[in-house]
Amino acid sequence: MRTRTSTWFECKIRYEKMMEDGMQKKITELYVVDALSFTEAESSIIDEMSAYISGEFEVRDIKKAPYGEIFFSEDASADRFFKAKLQFITIDEKTEKEKRSNVNYLVHANTFNQAVANIDKVMGTTAIDYVIASVAETQIMDVFEHNSAAKLKKEEPNDVPEYEQQPAAEGEAAAE
């Protein structure tokens, strides 16, 4: 189980999908991307979806997600996302009354019970008292994390002088 805190955006994509019966049907799917702005979210979802969709598609809606943290499951069968509302319980020192604050999370799991177990697995490592107020399955198809290291990594220039470089293999030299 791993968690990721970030600024998440929900993006709706509309495109024509080939159905099992061979018919083309316009569908709208919901995805989540990690981005710093609406502009970056749009660019990110276009880049990600271009690899999966042949033909035209349009970004129908982008909105800031109501959760700041996602619990990712390492289980290969986890293919759904559940929105979980947790209530953190604190005691007000002045009034000595119990106070509950709501926080939303997105939980990656295969079933409702697995989602609850994943919440307990992550939250069990904290000392915070909490109550699971609600867990509901979402329509989210996938989550795309920002991979700044891969996008920013550029090919390293070869700074070794030519006279110190290894000679090319004979087959490579003949090809030139």
Image: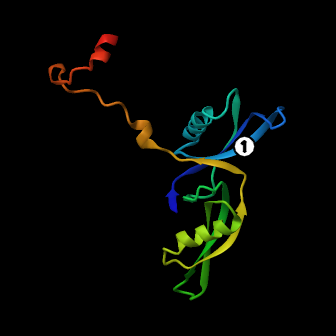
Amino acid type at circle 1 is Glu
* Left or right of residue 26, residue 59 in this image: left
* 57 up-or-down from 149: above or below: above
Q: Residue at x 53, y 69 (%)?
A: 122
Give percent across and percent down for residue 120: 58, 73
Residue 28 visible in the displayed image = yes
Residue 70 visible in the displayed image = no
* Left or right of residue 6, residue 80 in this image: right
* 145 up-or-down from 70: above or below: above
Give percent across and percent down for residue 130: 59, 77
* Left or right of residue 91, residue 59 in this image: right
Which residue is denoted by mark 1 in the rendering?
A: 29
Task: In this rendered view, identify the residue nearer to me: 170 or 164.
Answer: 170
Task: In this rendered view, identify the residue nearer to me: 33 or 37.
Answer: 33
For the C terminus, the quadrant is top left
Give percent across and percent down for residue 33: 58, 46
